[in-house]
Image: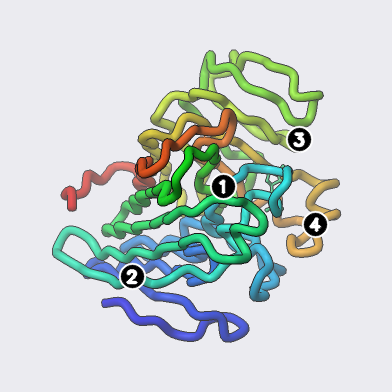
């Protein structure tokens, strides 16, 4: 079952429901998943209580879509995809999963910012305790272009002091808070006791977040997404963010997956497909 309805501040959104009772809310602005509740009623994603939900402005939480740029640069931060209205392509459901898809294509406004023609599609596949997102980028133009893309996912956690992210042991990272120096992570898992903002280029494809608000670990499996970014704003940066509560850093962690470091080159007419699977621990799901 899936229906477009008016969400917060009258912004259009889709509520995708799986037969198990799992639910996913996706706003047409940015094809932005803002809330995911698993079959047991656990809220998996973090959403700031101060997020503006204002058309054309980033939504603070859920799964912001990053394209065609990650971070600061010539385009709006993290690219224009998350602040543009996407087209709803429809939804479908089977016993295994409930699916919906959205697309963004170039416009006069995007071409003014970024002189390329493109088609991007996000497909969401919701299962009882799993969410799979397929991210397709097509170069519909006459020349190659460079892009970065990814999912800037905010996970809800019980308390950040009890959170760990494993799977990056021994991986090299670039620390954005320490003059982008390259380091190697020698700890068994990433833990949090300060502002953390780092990218792991060419990171392993499987990660596990422990300390999630649901009390159950979350496994992340990425495909064709080279990099991982780990971010928590901690105390001072949280205070400086107008759309983020001063104490909300305690209840979230961003584990971002995508091509967020070295840009990819997409030749004319080519299609790049990547995906991320978020699985609540302990349950295998039927493919779909
Ligand atoms: O992904 C980490 C990061 O680049 C941080 O530096 C922080 O700025 C975060 O993204 C949030 O960015 P936003 O533009 O959504 O406020």
Q: Position of residue 28 (x, y in %)?
A: 48, 71
Q: Position of residue 39 (x, y in %)?
A: 31, 63
* Mark 4 vs mark 1, CA separation in Å: 24 Å
* Mark 3 vs mark 1, CA separation in Å: 29 Å
* CB atoms of marks 4 and 3 within 8 Å: no
Secondary element under disc 1, as helix, strand or loop, is loop
Which tag, 4 or 1, sits closer to the chain's start? 1
Task: Kindly identify the residue that appears in the image at 22 percent across and 69 percent down.
Answer: 92
Q: Position of residue 189 (x, y in %)?
A: 54, 25
Q: Position of residue 11 (x, y in %)?
A: 56, 80
> Which residue lies under the disc numbered 1?
68
In the visual, does 158 lie left or right of 266?
right
Residue 194: which disc?
3
Task: Kindly identify the residue that appears in the image at 68 percent across and 43 percent down.
Answer: 71
* Mark 4 vs mark 3, CA separation in Å: 16 Å
Local crowd at mark 2 within 10 Å, few (<14), some, or many (≥20)?
Answer: few
Task: Kindly identify the residue that appears in the image at 17 percent across and 58 percent down.
Answer: 96
| 14 versus 152 height, above or below | below
> Which residue lies under the disc numbered 4?
241
Mark 1 sits near ligand 1, with its Cβ under 8 Å away: no
Image quadrant in which the N terminus is located? bottom left
Q: How is the image coloured?
A: rainbow
* Mark 3 vs mark 2, CA separation in Å: 41 Å
> Which residue lies under the disc numbered 2?
89
Q: What is the quadrant of residue 163 in the picture?
A: top right
| 135 versus 174 height, above or below | below
Which tag, 4 or 3, sits closer to the chain's start? 3
Task: Kindly identify the residue that appears in the image at 44 percent across and 32 percent down.
Answer: 207
Mark 4 sits near ligand 1, with its Cβ under 8 Å away: yes
């Amino acid at each position: 079952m899936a229906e477009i309805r008016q969400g917060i501040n009258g912004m259009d959104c889709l509520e995708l429901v799986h037969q198990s009772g799992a639910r996913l809310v996706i706003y047409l602005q940015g094809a932005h998943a803002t809330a995911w509740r698993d079959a047991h009623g656990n809220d998996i994603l973090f959403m700031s209580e101060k997020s503006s939900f204002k058309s054309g402005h980033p939504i603070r939480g859920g799964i912001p879509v990053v394209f065609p740029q990650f971070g600061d640069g010539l385009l709006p931060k993290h690219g224009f995809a998350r602040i543009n209205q996407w087209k709803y392509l429809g939804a479908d459901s089977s016993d295994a999963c409930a699916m919906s898809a959205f697309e963004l294509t170039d416009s006069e406004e995007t071409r003014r910012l970024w002189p390329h023609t493109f088609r991007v599609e996000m497909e969401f596949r919701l299962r009882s305790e799993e969410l799979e997102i397929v991210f397709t980028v097509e170069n519909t133009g006459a020349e190659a272009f460079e892009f970065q893309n990814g999912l800037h996912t905010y996970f809800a956690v019980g308390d950040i002091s009890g959170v760990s992210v494993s799977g990056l042991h021994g991986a090299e990272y670039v620390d954005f808070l320490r003059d982008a120096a390259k380091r190697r992570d020698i700890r068994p898992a990433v833990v949090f006791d300060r502002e953390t903002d780092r990218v792991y280029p060419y990171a392993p494809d499987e990660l596990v977040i422990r300390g999630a608000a649901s009390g159950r670990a979350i496994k992340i499996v990425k495909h064709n997404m080279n990099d991982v970014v780990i971010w928590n704003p901690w105390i001072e940066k949280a205070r400086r963010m107008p759309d983020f509560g001063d104490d909300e850093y305690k209840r979230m962690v961003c584990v971002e997956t995508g091509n967020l470091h070295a840009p990819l080159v997409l030749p004319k007419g080519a299609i790049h497909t990547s995906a991320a699977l978020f699985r609540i621990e302990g349950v295998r799901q039927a493919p779909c």
